[in-house]
Amino acid sequence: MSLDAEEAQPPPGRRPGRCPLGLAVLVLLVFAGGATVFRATPAKPPSQTSVRVRGTSLRAVGARGALGPIISAGQPPNNVLNAVVVPAGARPGAGAALLE
């Protein structure tokens, strides 16, 4: 190999510099796709009607009213309040005062 042959080689191209950029774009697309697929579903609004509990004379209603004394600063979350039911007419007992 002569010295002239080494000097005649072209300088390195821009391809090695594109690799990190390509990986960054790929990671961005993967996370954006994951966020789209796994996004949170909107909270289901609480039912305004009561439901008869099969096999009993009880009627189930949403627990938001019964849990009112313990709701503070967004706790428990709305999805929990919308999912929990209590017997119609249930009221907080003496133990609920301890939570305030």
Image (cartoon, grey):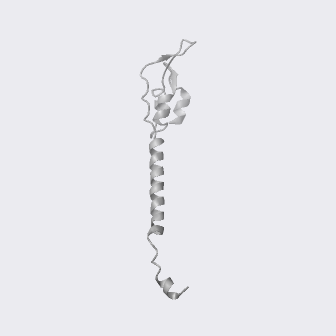
Residue 12 lies, in percent from the top left, at 46, 75
Residue 23 lies, in percent from the top left, at 48, 59
Q: How many numbered markers are drawn?
A: 0
Q: Residue furthest bottom?
A: 3
Would you place residue 45 above or below residue 49 in this image?
below
Please report the residue visible at 41 percent of the width from the left and 22 percent of the height from the top. Answer: 48
Would you place residue 96 above or below residue 89 in this image?
below
Query: Quick one: 8 or 55, which is closer to the camera?
Result: 8
Q: Residue furthest right?
A: 55
Residue 49 lies, in percent from the top left, at 43, 19
Query: Relative to 95, is 43 on the left or the right?
Result: left
Query: Quick one: 98 or 62, which is closer to the camera?
Result: 62
Would you place residue 16 above or below residue 66 in this image?
below
Query: Quadrant location of the N terminus?
Result: bottom right
Query: Quick one: 33 or 94, which is closer to the camera?
Result: 33
Query: Quick one: 80 or 1, which is closer to the camera?
Result: 1
Would you place residue 57 above or below residue 35 in this image?
above
Please report the residue visible at 47 percent of the width from the left and 79 percent of the height from the top. Answer: 9
Please report the residue visible at 43 percent of the width from the left and 70 percent of the height from the top. Answer: 14
Residue 24 lies, in percent from the top left, at 46, 59
